[in-house]
Amino acid sequence: MSAIVPAMDEPEVLAPVDVHGDALDATSVDATARVTSVRALLRAASGSFGLNVWNTAATVLTTIALARLMTLDAFGTYSWVVATVYLLTVPAILGVDRLIVREVAVYVSRGEHGHVRGLLRRSIQLVLATCAAIVALVAVALLVFGGASSPDTNTALMIGVLALPALSLAWVGQSALMGLHHVVQGQTPELFLRPGLLLGAVAIAALAVTGTISAPLAASLFTITAYVAAVLALVMLWQRMRASVPTAAPVFETRTWLAGAFALVLLSGALFINSQIGVVLLGFLNDPESAGLYAVAQRGAMLVAFPLLALNAALAPSAARLWAARNLPQLQRLTTIGARAVLLVSLPIAIVFIVAGEPLLRIVFGAPFAAAALPLAILSLGQLANAATGSVTTLLMMTGNQRRAAYGIGAGLALNLGLGIALIPGYGATGAAIAAATGLIVSNVIHTFIARSSLGVDPTAIGLAPRAPKAAE
């Protein structure tokens, strides 16, 4: 939802308002101050950091296990299926995940509990409807065009797509818990339980299966663990709703929510596409082996990125509330501290991958994956630039500037897609890495200028003093 925010010459003397432009009362302002301190942010960021450490470790271990238990062709097929399923979550979830984080945080601060319940109920209904439609379309497409692919690829894709409702509902639950300011608990099913369950399932399969693991079997493990994590996420949400949100009749603003979700889906969707398009294009334009190499390089680059992921999760609800209260000095302070901490942690990881990527890949994944060293170095450089600009995209989304953020994300996606199509046929995984890193860097540079002009906040590790922003859209 676009926020209408007046221009500010002296932001510190303005009455606090929320992202909808309405005044917040003194109680809400006090609540905002309590939940947006540096200590609270660091506590949430530390918890998120720990979850991301485990998620990254479990994901990398699962990737190592599958890379060694599957043929390179089967591993590439599985990686392509998972990337395709994640791309399909963009239309499936309709941007309501980001909308829920922002709107629930504001509704709770205003005591509008009926709106919280109405938003969650309508979001679940929309997500289930879109997931059912997408699964049906994929099934029809496989019946009509499945002859062009191998039976294993078709079977793995259909099994993987069945995970779509589980992934989408889990993100709805996670977003609602984050909006209620249970940042760590909200991420637990997705970042702790699901990767742990998948790692355990792969270990059991390795003991039970004679020979190599097929792509359909790996996709089945992915889908089953997604449903377990989704059920746990919704149970956690139900428990927190009972404790934190008083019973109230649901209030629905479906048109307003759909408008806000549509604007956010363009942004979150483009971000997802940017992260997955390389594997998908390699599957179409090159071969499964190249997709497998790129998937391994991408997993490695996750280690450079996960400190920023932890910060994004912790900062999102705080940014929404601080912007609602027009507390620019505190917003700048939290943003700068977070960006510097992220860069400090990400830098040595990136250096190791750039300098010693080939021997590390050879030792960890096996000799065939040493060819992913150059893509890993390129992606690490891109993620290092991403870390240096801090939580800029999250900051823009949580302050109602999603339409302005679309410029940077659109430019990055266009570069990623265009360069990928041009470079992948000739350079394979290296071409995909160049396209992804270039798009990421350009997107973040554009977003940094937008944040400085629209919010008056410097999102980078430099941390320039806040200044009077322009009116938000």
Image (spheres, rainbow, N blue to C red):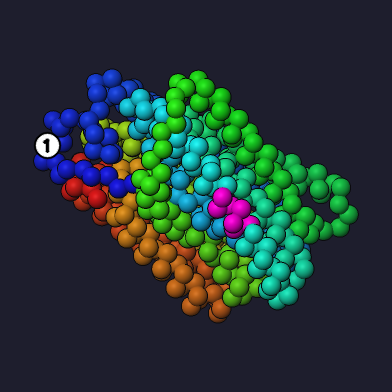
* Residue at image location 19% in from the left, 47% down from the top: 471
| Image position of 469 (left or right of 189) | left
Q: Which residue is mark 1?
A: 10
Q: Which residues are magenta?
A: 129-135
Q: Main structural element of the magenta stretch: helix, strand or loop? A: helix
Closer to the camera in the image, 390 or 345: 390
Toward the viewer: 145 or 468? Answer: 145
User: Does the magenta-highlighted stretch encompass residue 128?
Assistant: no
Instruction: Judge the density around disc 1: few (<14), some (14-19), many (≥20) Cα neighbours within 10 Å.
Output: few
Quarter residue 170 falls in: top right
Tell me residue 37's x, y (percent).
Answer: 33, 26
Q: Is residue 151 visible in the rendered structure shown here? A: yes
Q: Answer above or below: position of 176 versus 202.
A: above
Q: Is residue 298 visible?
A: no
Query: Residue 143 at what x, y percent from top left?
Result: 71, 69
Q: Is residue 436 left or right of residue 296?
A: left
Q: Nearer the viewer, residue 14 or 416?
A: 14
Q: Residue furthest left?
A: 9
Local SS, label 1: loop
Q: Name the residue: 74% across, 52% down.
A: 220
Residue type at mark 1 is Glu
Residue at screen point 82% across, 58% down: 212
